[in-house]
Image: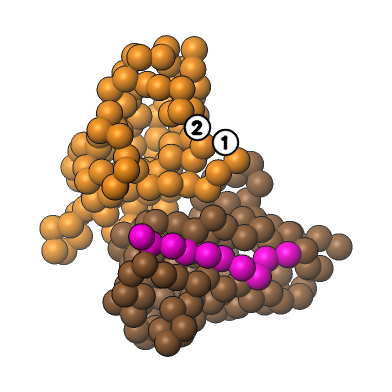
Chain colours: A brown, B orange
Amino acid sequence: QVQLVESGGGVVQPGTSLRLSCAASGFTFSQFGMHWVRQAPGKGLEAVAIVSYDGSIQSYVDSVKGRFTISRDNSKNTVYLQMNSLGPEDTAVYYCAKGFYDSGPWGQGTLVTVSS
Amino acid sequence: EVVMTQSPLSLPVTLGQPASISCRSSQSLVDSDGNTWLNWFQQRPGQSPRRLIYKVYYRDSGVPDRFSGSGSGTDFTLKISRVEAEDVGVYFCMQGTQWPKTFGQGTKLEIK
């Protein structure tokens, strides 16, 4: 079955960078778009970045444009989220999810805490 | 961006009774190919969201058949025919037709 495992979260100081990874299995990774969704503590859900099946299309929500970069390595069945210039507002659990127009399933998430 | 509006935000339900959650979008979710990318998710306390329904009414594998989705255009509904204790949690609708994907505020289902 489809499995998505996120890693790379942690506690970082404002202004620093972090790279999240999501290892996928159980489906033909290179045929599907992927995206990242975050959930701030006690808050709702926000889709932050999306990449097409071949990596040629990336899109971002306005709040992360210019700071976050989504990429993928189809040879490693992995999607990445490079996060730069992190601020307290980026504190959240980050989930990776399968799909371009569709969404699901999701991974278990990785917690990113931005705090001084 | 497409605004998703759920109601109610709080839903106390007696065990064995039905429950219904509404989700309305600010724009039609039908894409140029005729697909409607509307999903429903369940988030149990302390867990990550789990997709229940995709493309309005298709149930995910392993989802009990007491869950059903319906609707079209801008108006969608998630129904639980008979609520069980394990259904406690927050339910979200999500549209994927237009980027950015957007979510409803969430409906907290609790047992009365």
User: Dominant secondary structure of the magenta stretch?
Assistant: strand
Q: Is residue A69 above or below residue B31?
A: below
Q: Residue B57 location in percent, x, y?
A: 21, 42
The chain that hosts pointer 2 is: B
Q: On the picture, is A22 further left or further right than A25?
A: right
CB atoms of marks 1 and 2 within 8 Å? yes
Q: Quadrant of residue A92?
A: bottom right
Q: Quadrant of residue A20?
A: bottom right
Q: Nearer the viewer, residue B1 or B71?
A: B71
At label 1, the amino acid type is Pro
What SS does tag 2 mark? strand
Tell me which residue sits at (53%, 65%) in the image: A5
Task: Name the quadrant of the N terminus of chain A.
Answer: bottom left
Q: On the picture, is B22 further left or further right than A13?
A: left
Q: Quadrant of residue A113?
A: bottom right
The chain that hosts pointer 1 is: B
Q: Which residue is mark 2?
A: B89
Q: Is residue B1 visible?
A: no
Residues in magenta? A1-10
First reached walking from the N terminus: tag 1 or tag 2:
1
Q: Residue A81 location in percent, x, y?
A: 56, 74
Q: Which residue is mark 1?
A: B45
Q: Nearer the viewer, residue B51 or A44?
A: B51
